[in-house]
Amino acid sequence: MYNKKLNLVLLGLALVAPFVLYPVFLMKVLCFALFACAFNLLLGFAGMLSFGHAVFLGTGAYVTGYVMTTYGLTPELGILAGVVMSALVGLVYGKLAVRREGIYFAMVTLALAQLAFFFFLQTPLTGGEDGLQGIPRGKLFGLIDLTDNMTMYYFVLAVFIIGFLTIYRTIHSPFGQVMKAIRENEPRAISLGYKVNQYKLMAFVISATLAGLAGSTKALVFQLASLTDVHWFMSGEVVLMTLLGGMGTIWGPVLGAAAIVSMQNFLASGPLANYIHVLMGVVFVICVLAFRNGLVGELQKVIRKNSG
Amino acid sequence: MKLMLKTAAATALITVAGLAHGSFSDDKVKIGVLTDMGGVYSDITGQGSIEAVQMAVDDFGGQVLGKPIEVISADTQLKPDIGSTIARQWIENEQVDVINGAVASSVTGAVTKVMSNAGKITLIAAPASHAFTTSACSPYNAHWSYDVVSLANGTVKPMVEGGKNKWFFITADYGFGHALESVATGVIEANGGEVVGGVRAPLGTSDFSSYILQAQSSGADVIALANTGSDMVNALKTAAEFGVTEMAEVAGLLVFTPNAQALDPAIAGGMKLTTGFYWDMDDQTREWSKRYMARMDGKIPSMAQAGAYSSTMHYLKAVEAVGTDESDAVMAKMKETPVEDFFSRNGYLRKDGRMVHDMLQVRIKNADERNNENDIFAIERVIKGEDAFLKLEDGGCAFALSQE
């Protein structure tokens, strides 16, 4: 949020976009953008690489899907249930994971995520390989029917903006400053008297909660919660989105998510469909070798050079 | 009399529907083919299914009542979320009228839900689960080639009746395997046999030795393989290596022709199985298969691929007869017309969407019986459709039963 004008232009674009592009595609971009932003909060601002973030996306999706199909709740309550559950899982996993740093932290999160994956595969509640199918979108507050794609799009946009503003506020709060201090120099933060592990745990829980919000919303958009959402591929994909867009920038993950989702979408039906993973790998390698700050990071550099 | 009244009412309804809608959405008929292009099921569906649908369209003349027929296709990568997303996009953006295919029961479940909500027909040619015409049935499902019930009735029942009483299952650990195992267990117990044990192997297991040893020590008469594709091939090879095939009989519950072709006749020869279609059955099947093979570099068709052609043809004929691509009218016509072609014998599409037709019990030929590389099965007997599939009233398909 570098200036108000840019934000207004972007908001305007988001409002008219569904008249030009396919709404379901845009909703997918928004859901993954929120997921990547939540992940970026942890990696980019607290310096913690979680390699099991799909579990929060998946928990949100499955819980929302389950309560909506089984108890017929309204969408806002369904999402709330998914988000609360993700937060709880985040709390437990965070408690265990923040005790370690660096590669060990990544490995612990990966291991815990695999445990969760096995649970979702085996429990009779989730439909195993089939996933939860035909989740109703329902009526928002019992009033607004979300079956229409346009209505659903503006709902998802609202959810995204709420999530995005939460992240923005978190980063620019005193809490966010401490988070960055820990990222830059953890021993120094400790010596200044901050209880580092509590700050890390807090960041982890916020990130997990917002990832859950993305998952819950995604389940409503596609009316489906499946193993893809909790698979470690998904954890890897969000790392790719964040790195490609620009780790530690506000808009980076959004751009990264948009780029990856568009790639998947347009390549899936073309002659290159079988090489989609190869192409994504190539993009990743180029990104890491040539522009390590990501798309937004490099753009910022150019702007800074020109203005300075 | 009652039947006549019903028929008259149905005909009147169709006529009205035909007059009211006598039109085509976006002035063409668009068929979407969802399939697996690079995964474990690409041999039995994949490019062959797309080609089979295209062949049906070409045989039909490329247009229906002057409106062009278009075929588009996509790869689901065997994932329900990708399948349902594509289906939704096809309906909303591409004006697709009908989807053919969608391999793997998990993907098909998700796709049929999207299609039914939009009031569009799914022609289900490859998946095995019987849910699409029972617990998860819909007026817009047409399940074509076979299902788990017909496999169990065709393969398991005669073996139990022939005195093979003790069964052991090696099951693929996901929806399809579980469904097949539970249906087969029902058949075994109903005929006085018993299941002495079972083990679940993950999809894509390469080393079956521990499972085979478990099966060996169970003392079963029959080791049933409730898996398919390369899993079935690997399990059978391992069983042969351990000499299990000499002590007990191994029954492959779902063996597609390309899989049987890939097996060494020394191992697989003599095994009995059930299939919905075999290319070398009679002149009609041979004539069609020759044309198919000419388009597919000489590969023989699986029952899923032949079913894709047959279902597309039946759909197009119904569209032509009612003069619209409006789903309800087309489906009513499809259910009214018998399905009689190279693929289906004594076939008809039942109210619940099950295409009931004669199944074949076949035996894999030994090496010395084979005349060429495509000569794989010897047909043992024909199973009447009524005996092979679940009865309508036992299926529990709510909308079909309420129409009774």
Image (spheres, coloured by chain):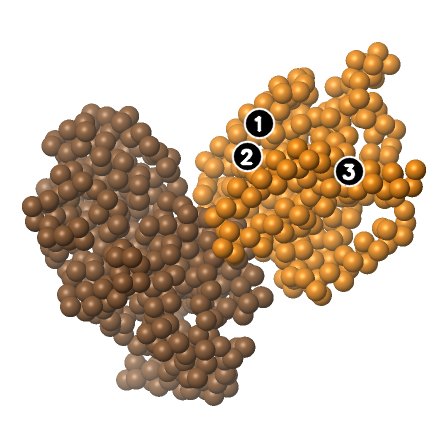
Q: Could you say whether the residue bearing mark 3 is in a helix, strand or loop?
A: helix
Colour of chain A, in one word, is: orange
* Residue tagged 1: A110
Please tell me in which quadrant of the rendered image residue A229 appears: top right
Q: Is residue A24 left or right of residue A119?
A: right
Image location of residue B91, percent across then percent down:
54, 66
Separation (CA) of disc 1 from disc 3: 27 Å
* Residue tagged 2: A232
Q: Is residue A231 visible?
A: yes
Q: Is residue B49 left or right of residue B382?
A: right
N-terminal of the pair, mark 2 or mark 3, is 2
Q: Amino acid at mark 3?
A: Gly
Colour of chain B, in one word, is: brown
Separation (CA) of disc 2 from disc 1: 8 Å
Q: Amino acid at mark 1?
A: Leu
N-terminal of the pair, mark 2 or mark 1, is 1
